[in-house]
Image (cartoon, helix red, strand yellow):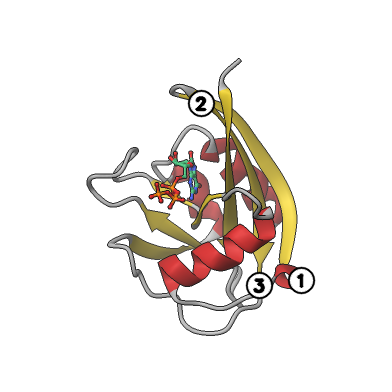
């Protein structure tokens, strides 16, 4: 069986109900596609701790595990790995998201979510999120 790739992803929701999407920069796998901020879960790291860390590293915002609500997950073959990716919703954080890793950021209305060019694992998640918001 393919090795599991554990990734934690987060839908930041603003006061107008929009979702923050990030566009993967050139040079990374799946470059140009829109994804949820987040990243790989390290050894000895909980998914929540990984997200708090990634949101700081990628977006310069601070949040905490108690502000992360799990809403869905993706389970998808991805090259030599099998991606298992829990998606959390976060509505409370400190700071203004800034693109620290060369990514483009966009606040997206719920109706526009499913029209974005996304990695295959994200498409069902975007639809679930749209129906939830
Ligand atoms: N963050 C994030 N990763 C996703 C999403 N959808 C998806 O297929 N992935 C995949 O999950 C993996 C996450 O890798 P990453 O490159 O963002 O994570 P990272 O920052 O920890 O990795 P790095 O340190 O190697 O750059 C990639 O293979 C990426 O393509 C998504 O919505 N958000």
Q: Label 2 CB, ligand 1: below 8 Å? A: yes
Q: Which residue is mark 3?
A: 91
Q: Is residue 94 above or below residue 66?
A: below
Q: Which mark is residue 86?
A: none
Where residue 33 appears, x then y in whole percent?
36, 44
For the residues labelled 3 and 2, the Cα–Cα distance comes to 31 Å
Name the image quarter holding residue 48: bottom right
Tell me the quarter of the image containing the N terminus: top right
Which of label 1 and label 2 is nearer to you?
A: 2
Q: Label 3 CB, ligand 1: below 8 Å? A: no
Q: Earlier in the sequence, mark 3 or mark 2?
A: 2
Q: Which mark is residue 66?
A: 1
Q: Which residue is mark 2?
A: 81
The structure residue drawn at horizontal position 49% and vertical position 72%, both measured from the top left corner, is: 56
Where residue 17 appears, x then y in whole percent?
61, 69
The structure residue drawn at horizontal position 59% and vertical position 61%, both measured from the top left corner, is: 51
């Amino acid at each position: 069986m393919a090795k599991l790739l554990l990734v934690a992803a987060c839908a930041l929701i603003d006061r107008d109900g929009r979702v923050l999407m990030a566009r993967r920069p050139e040079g990374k796998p799946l470059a140009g596609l829109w994804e949820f901020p987040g990243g790989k879960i390290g050894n000895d790291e909980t998914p929540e701790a990984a997200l708090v860390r990634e949101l700081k590293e990628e977006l310069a915002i601070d949040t905490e595990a108690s502000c992360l609500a799990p809403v869905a997950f993706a389970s998808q073959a991805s090259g030599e790995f099998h991606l298992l990716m829990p998606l959390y919703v976060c509505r409370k954080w400190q700071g203004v998201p800034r693109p620290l890793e060369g990514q483009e950021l966009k606040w997206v209305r719920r109706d526009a979510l499913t029209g974005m060019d996304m990695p295959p694992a994200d498409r069902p998640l975007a639809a679930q999120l749209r129906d939830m918001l």
